[in-house]
Image (cartoon, rainbow, N blue to C red):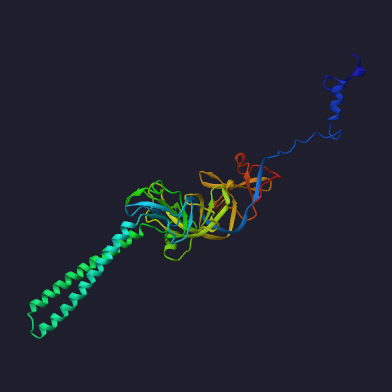
Amino acid sequence: MNESSSFHLPRGGWVTAALASALALSGCGHGAPAPVAAAPKGVVVEAVDAITRTQPITIDTFGHVDAAATVSFVPLVNARVTALLVGDGAEVKAGDPLIRLDNRSYAAVLTRMQGEKAARAAQVAALQSRTDRSQDLVAGDFIAPQQAQESQVELAQAQAALAAAEAGVQQATVDLENCEPKAPFAGRVGLLKAPAAVGNFVTAGGDPLLELRSLDQLKVEFSVPESALSVLEQMASGSKDLKVVVTAHGDSSRRLEGPVAAFDNVIDPRTRSIKVRATLANTGRLFWPGQFVDVQMVVGVADNAILVPYRAINTGPNGPYLYVVDGTKAALKPVTLGAQAGDLVVVQSGVTSGQKVIVSGQLGLQDGSIVQVSTAAASL
């Protein structure tokens, strides 16, 4: 081999000129430095700042709306329907007549009972005069006391007959009024029932003719956990006012507020909850009886409450926790939670206002994991 094309190592080994050149380039202080490995990018997460604000404390549940007043008109007399004074879905005022039944026989009964009452009243007047005269004659020894007693008995009998006649007049008056029932309050008539047709003969206590519901005043019924009983008792004692915020399910633009009016006298042992009723002034008729609604019962207010998105919360064997961004790392923070407020939750301990709370990407984290906060992070 030609000596000019090889490099002789002191130990006697032989290498090619190309290998010798590479060795020379790798020597200390000669040529370009070796490339440095890139730092790990970390887990991509989204984070938001924990905020502080005055926060209503609510119990979120659902319920249904009903009319504050509902009446079903069942016939109270036996008669034939002669006229319908309202139609399907009619709006009525208090005192408006709704339906007319044939009242001729009841008017005749009333006239007869009025005549009987007048006759009985005249009889009582005559017997009262005779009894008074008898008392005077007894005092002058003109008649025996027994005769005066007989007059008193006859008077008592006549007075009883008069009372019966007066009751008959009252009953006949009621029957006549029931031939034309009137609306006891303002509201809306539902669809007329089948018996409510002109010519139909209806019987007392039979099928309803129509239903009337108030729409301007509503009540909403819902259930809350038995743990809320203490604040309900405070309301009942007058030491606390409670209100509800009612929202149409799936339509947050329909929203009303009203006071809690009452709660049930028993806790449901199956659900460990108690029924509550609130009243609503149905301004603009935003709600309809029977409607399913979302309900928030406001039980208090937390001043300077720290809130984070509820989706930041994880649950472990030691209770709830979340991650915050600490420099380039994730730090696990056990937390104590308060009331939930929509998509947010009050954190009573474990986080301070302004700390960046990780809300997305937590599944790939552990305490001390390197993180990269996304520039598209959500914000409160």
Relative to residue 286, is residue 126 depicted above or below? below
Q: Residue furthest bottom?
A: 140
- Depth check, front residue: 39 or 237: 237
Could you tell whether 29 is left or right of 326 in the image? right
Whether residue 362 appears in this view of the structure is yes
Query: Quarter holding the N terminus?
Result: top right
Whether residue 9 appears in this view of the structure is no
Image spot of residue 52 (x, y percent): 61, 57
Could you tell whether 348 is left or right of 195 in the image? right
Could you tell whether 120 is left or right of 248 in the image? left
Could you tell whether 225 is left or right of 125 in the image? right
Image spot of residue 278 (x, y percent): 46, 57
Residue at 21% x, 75% y: name it: 125
Residue 182, image quadrant? bottom left
Relative to residue 134, is residue 310 depicted above or below? above
- Depth check, front residue: 239 or 215: 215
Image spot of residue 219 (x, y percent): 46, 56
Q: How many marks on residues?
A: 0
